[in-house]
Image (spheres, helix red, strand yellow):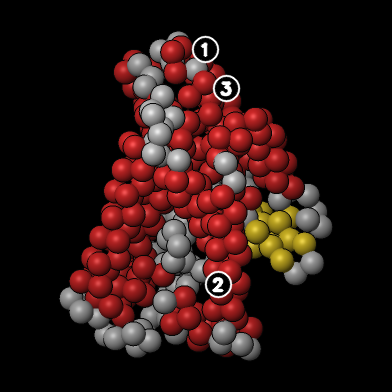
Amino acid sequence: MVYSASYYSAEIHYNNQYYFLTKQIIGVVLGLIALVAMRYVNYQKLIKFKWWAVLCATILLVLVFIPGIGIENYGAKRWIGFGGFSFQPSEIAKFVLVLFCAIHLSQNHEKIKSFKTLLPMLFVGGVFCLLVIIEPNMSITMCLALVLIIMLFLGGISGKHFGLLATLGLAIVPILIFLEPYRVNRLMAFLDPWANPQGEGFQLIQSLYALGSGGLFGVGLFESRQKFLFLPFAESDFIFSIMGEEIGFFGCLVILLIFGLLIYLLIKISRNSCDRFGSLLVAGIASVIAVQTLLNIAVVTGSIPPTGLPLPFISAGSTSLIVFMGAIGLCLNVYKKSNCKKI
């Protein structure tokens, strides 16, 4: 799908129709290495790197703002580049947040009803969200915030604290939207994309054209028309639209069922884990996959205002692919040790 969605734009912009495909293959290879490494490294040893992981993720998020290191595209500073290679630190920050919360919750489960116990997680989550929102990247910020709230819920915080944090989070969203004019324009495009069909509403309209053209069974693999520079970011954030056009409603339904099966299996691993840390770690990884998948599909179908967020495992982007595959390796690690007496 990455090749199908990108070969035309890659030929136009890079004079190489295999540009995105090559990068994705490299991502797959490195992702498999990360998966195998995480599969065989004892996940319980990660506990002692709790604050070191947070420090490294924070430094990486800060480096995107350093001239000569950070890379700016489309007005956003979200990438770090070294010698022709680049990666997106916010993709790493999501899983570092899950790791930190899983460790902290497992170590303090008897004191979880105390608000004081929540403060380290709120602090780390707040720092990550702040650094990501000023890139700016509201989509990853929302993903981080939702994953944090889910982790706190899974950790067993009190209903009062959960309600307070959820309400606060919902109140912050409109504030963040109205702080930036471009976010207001995107909101207007979501409410009525035809009000500015050549401007802010263009991408959503083209996405809906792609999905509508696919019908029930699609126009056929490699036969998409919207990828011919009509739909921006067809190979990354909006690849699901091209999939809808080429393999149709039923093809997309199969993809969603596969995601559902993956999340179900991860929840099963979480429930069967022999320790609280492993259980929370896998549940957190499952929540990242679920949240990001739902947000991506909601955007391309016009269910929420447009924002950039890749579809896990499918969208072009080596950083995302490597990190998600490494996370799956951690889940397999927990599964490997599940045949023990539960703690």
- Name the residue rendered at 33%, 36% in the picture: 271
Mark linked to residue 120: 3
Q: Position of residue 233 (x, y in %)?
A: 49, 70
Disc 2 crowd, CA 10 A, few/some/many (<14, 14-19, 20+): many
Q: Residue at x 44, y 30 (%)?
A: 275
Q: Are marks 1 and 3 in contact (CB under 8 Å)?
A: no
Q: Quadrant of the C terminus?
A: top left
Element type at mark 3:
helix
227 is higher (above) or lower (below) than 324: below
Instruction: Tell me if residue 92 can be seen.
Output: yes
Position of 339 with respect to 127 (left or right) is left
Between discs 1 and 2, the one toward the N terminus: 2
Q: Nearer the viewer, residue 240 or 281?
A: 281
Q: Residue at x 43, y 28 (%)?
A: 276
Residue 320 occupies quadrant:
bottom right
Q: Amino acid at mark 2?
A: Gln
Work out whether residue 298 can be spotted.
Answer: no
Q: Eyeballing the image, is 46 above or below 32?
A: above
- Could you give the CA–CA distance between mark 1 and mark 3, rounded to whole angstroms? 8 Å
Q: In x, y percent, where is residue 305?
A: 38, 53
Q: Which amino acid lies under the numbered mark 3 shown in the image of this protein?
A: Pro
- Mark 2 highlights which residue? 24
